[in-house]
Each structure stands twice: as structure tokens, then as C-alpha cells.
Amino acid sequence: MSFVIETLTGAALERALPALARLRLKVFREWPYLYDGTTSYEQRYLADFTRCEGSLIVAARDDEDVIGAATAAPLRGHTAAFAKLFEAHGYDPDELFYFGESVLLREYRGRGIGHAFFDWREEHARSSTGSKGPYRYTTFCAVVRPDDHPLKPRDYRPLDPFWSKRDYRMVEGLVGKLSWKDIDQAGETEKPMQFWIKPLE
């Protein structure tokens, strides 16, 4: 398998929105997100994301097929609702760059694309400047599911070791809340989202 990693902007991004939406729906339907969303919502979400100043969308392609994507944006601009949570833990939200989704088709995993997504986003964060100067940290969050969840695969391997190797650390108590509809539920429910943080050097 061969692939190309590129930044999507302008007309190229507009053309890719339907494919990106389908990709998100497919990958996030898997454990641990179990997300039951719609293509129309995903396209609106991605379009709104690109309007955030300083945002980045990176995609991986195999020929013309989008097989992976990752997003990043200043925390204050994209996920301002989490600002008070970070302030309560001693972080200045204006110094944080937030990494959103990182999705990749199963058959392309283990080929270094996940690392490349982090490399590209971290470099973008380092080269960006916020209202208080250079950003000091990158951060992302991951859903927390109970170990005895009935839909948890027996062979599931958490990504904690991967994130730790990239020098991210889980911050105890730094947990936000997001809501979506699970594939086995009738409506949306609130989920705990654990944040991980890495200092930028």
C-alpha cells in the first residue's frame, strides 16, 4: 500500500468534504466511540472547523481515496467550552493547541500514518502564534468507556502506550463532556472525555 499525506485547504478541501465525512462515520462507528452520526452533520462540522482561524486538516490518500485524516485548531477558537476546565487545572486556554479527530482505516494502521498525523499537527502548532504569543502545549481528548461495556472487543488494544511514547500525559481530573448517539442507543448520551497534554519545546 502506498499513500500520500497532505494539508487540505480551499477547493481541495471542499472536494474532499464528502469523503472525509464518510471516513469519520466509518472509523468512529468502531469501539470505543460507537458513534452513530449522519453524513450531512459531518460535512457541516468539518466545514465549520475550517473557518476557525489557525485550523488545520491533514489527510492521507491512497491514490484518490481518502484513507485517513486529522484535525487541529487553537483550543479557544474551536473548543472554547473547555476553557474553564483547563483554567481550573492551571492552564491558560490561549496557550493550548487542540488536536481533534485522528481517523484512519483499519487496513492502513501500523504504517506510521498515525505518527505522521501527530508530527504534522505538532509542527503546525509550533509555527502558529496566538493572542499571547507562541502556543505552549498541544492537547487532545479520548472517550472513557467502562471496562465491562458489552460492545468492547476482546482484542481491543488502547492507544495509551502510543500517546505516551509521543510524550503526552494524561492529566488526572481533566475530563470534559461531549454528547453523541451510540450505535446501540436510541438517543444522545453524555460521555466523559479524558484530556492528554504535551508541552511544546
Image (cartoon, rainbow, N blue to C red):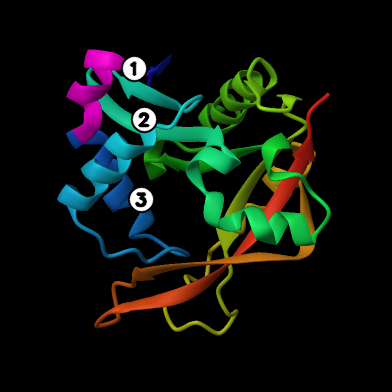
Query: Which residue lies under the disc numbered 1?
Result: 9
| 98 w.r.t. 32: above or below | above
Residue at x-position 31% and y-position 21%:
62
Q: Position of residue 60 (x, y in %)?
A: 39, 24
Q: Is residue 50 above or below residue 197?
A: above
Q: CA distance from mark 1 to mark 2?
A: 8 Å
Q: Is residue 194 visible?
A: yes
Highlighted magenta segment, given as a residue range: 8-17
Pick out the residue farthest to the front.
131
Residue 118 horizontal side relative to residue 138, left or right: left
Q: Crowding near pointer 3: few (<14 within 10 Å), some, many (20+)?
A: some
Give the percent coordinates (x, y) of residue 27: 35, 50
Report if residue 15 lies within the magenta region.
yes
Viewer-nearest of discs 3 and 2: 2
Quarter that holds the N terminus: top left
Kindly identify which residue carries mark 3.
Answer: 27
* Disc number lying in front (3 or 1): 1
Q: Amino acid at mark 1?
A: Thr
Q: Quadrant of residue 143?
A: bottom right
Q: Residue at the location (25% across, 47% down)?
A: 42
Which secondary structure lies at badge 2? helix
- For residue 33, side relative to residue 88 (left or right): left
Number of labelled discs? 3
Residue 111 drawn at (x, y percent):
52, 29
Q: Is residue 46 above or below residue 171?
A: above
Q: Is residue 87 left or right of residue 38?
A: right
Identity of the amino acid at label 3?
Val
The answer to which of 180 and 107 lies nearer the viewer is 180
Please state which of the two labelled residues, at mark 1 or mark 2, is closer to the viewer: 2
**Distance between the alpha carbons at the discs numbered 3 and 2:** 21 Å
Q: Which residue is the site of mark 2?
A: 50
